[in-house]
Image: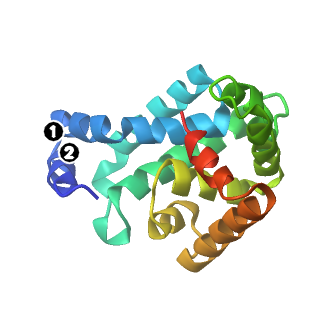
Amino acid sequence: MENNDIIYIERCKEGDGEAFAVLYDRYIDKIYRFVYYKVFEKETAEDIVSEAFSKAFEHIVGYDETKGSFSSWLYRIARNAVIDHYRGKKETANIEDIFELSYSERFSEKLDAKEVFKKISEHLESLSPKQREIIILRVWEDLSYKEIAEITGASEGSVKMAFLRAIKDIREKFGPLALALLALMRP
């Protein structure tokens, strides 16, 4: 947690909207990336992030720093907003199928290593949604295992084990360069 998050949180609890704006600016990019990699649609991600921050503002009075970091609290709200989004859709869309939407196309345009990206991307698609989420949060969002555990509701040990197994598998299948490419897949 940023050193002065708690100061701004306390000011928010007292009704200071400008203090929330500071927190918003501090976390918007991370939360947006997290949501975007869940839905892969810019407009939908923007709507969900807006909803998540609105809920955070509404419920900041209930935030308890003893139960976890502020960023973990925001990620949980965003994660729940994504789940609510898919629950509310009339059409039958499987949230896990969203990961497959033009995945290799997005990254192959950015780098020459198209074949490696395609293979890594296919491998990521074969992971469970939980493993993908952990990889996104650990590699792309650079969160600690403790923060990921707070977000996902899993134990810190199980998060670490799931991440290490997925990374080991990627390294064994594609070599050590694949881990660097995985990190570069981030927007």
Q: Amino acid at mark 2?
A: Cys
Q: Nearer the viewer, residue 95 or 84?
A: 95
**Residue under the image location 58 percent in, 34 percent down:** 36
Q: Position of residue 15 (x, y in %)?
A: 17, 41
Circle 1 SS class = loop
Image quadrant holding the N terminus, namely bottom left
> What residue is pinned by disc 1?
16
Residue at point 53% right, 57% down?
Answer: 138
Q: Secondary structure at mark 2?
A: helix
Q: Amino acid at mark 1?
A: Asp
Residue under the point 59% across and 50% down: 180
Q: State left or right for residue 127 relative to residue 37.
A: right
Quadrant hosting residue 65: bottom left
Side of 85 relative to 148 (left or right):
right
Residue 111 vertical placement versus 159 (above, below): above
Q: Position of residue 173 (x, y in %)?
A: 80, 59
The numbered dot on residue 78 is: none
Number of callouts: 2
Residue drawn at x 76%, y 49% as measured from the top left: 124
Please tell me which residue lies in front, 5 or 109: 109
Q: Is residue 129 left or right of residue 66?
A: right
Cα gap from disc 1 to disc 2, whole angstroms: 5 Å
What residue is shown with label 2? 12
Disc 1 and disc 2 in contact, CB within 8 angstroms: yes
- Where residue 30 appears, x then y in whole percent? 43, 41
